[in-house]
Structure formats: C-alpha cells, structure tokens
Amino acid sequence: MDAEKMTLKVQSALQSAQEIALRMSNQNIDGEHLLLALIKQEDGLVPKLLEKMNVGVKEFESKLEGEMNSK
C-alpha cells in the first residue's frame, strides 16, 4: 500500500488500529482492530452509518471490545 495515496482519515484509522492492536498485545492488525478504530473516529462515516441502521454505537463498540478481549 502506498500511504501517500491514502486520505488522512484512512491513515489515522490505520494508525489507531495499530495502537489498539499493540494495547491488546496483538502482533497483527485484524479487521476488528480497524473496525474499532473506525467506530472511534471523530466525525467518521462508520458511526453515522451505524446510527442510520439504528445500531447503538456505544453498545456495538462495547460488544466488539468484549469479543476482542475474549480471544
């Protein structure tokens, strides 16, 4: 991947996903790490989409973190 061709939002999400993986003592960045980073992104698209689908963002985030911690 060429980081120069990525938007700032994508670069930020990937960096956040890496930080989440490190915090959880994971050596690899998985889709769950990226999803959690996208959910936490301020003014991001994912929280808005979840809200439009009537999905509680905080509840979804909590369940995702719970699943990730149980692995």
Image (spheres, rainbow, N blue to C red):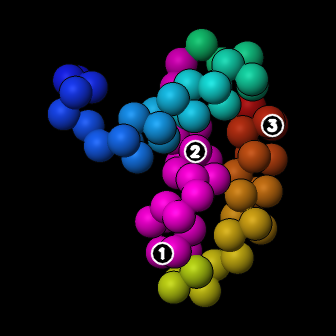
Q: Amino acid at mark 1?
A: Leu
Residue assigned mark 3: 70
Tell me, yes or no, if residue 18 can be seen here. yes
- Looking at the rendering, the stretch of residues picked out in magenta corresponds to 28-50
Residue assigned mark 2: 37
Among numbered discs 2 and 1, the one appearing first in the sequence: 2
Density class for disc 1 (Cα within 10 Å; few <14, some 14-19, many ≥20) is: few
C-alpha separation, residue under disc 3 versus residue under disc 2: 18 Å
Residue 47, by quadrant, is bottom right
Magenta span dominant secondary structure: helix
69 relative to 42, above or below: above
Residue assigned mark 1: 49
Quick one: SS at disc 3?
helix
Label 3 or label 1, whichever lies nearer to me, is: 1
Among numbered discs 3 and 1, the one appearing first in the sequence: 1
Write the residue at 66% across / 31% down.
Answer: 20
Q: Amino acid at mark 2?
A: Ala
Q: Is residue 17 left or right of residue 6?
A: right
Q: Is residue 71 left or right of residue 30?
A: right
Write the residue at 81% across / 37% down.
Answer: 70
Residue 56 position in % (x across, y down): 70, 76
Write the residue at 74% across / 32% down.
Answer: 71
Density class for disc 2 (Cα within 10 Å; few <14, some 14-19, many ≥20) is: many
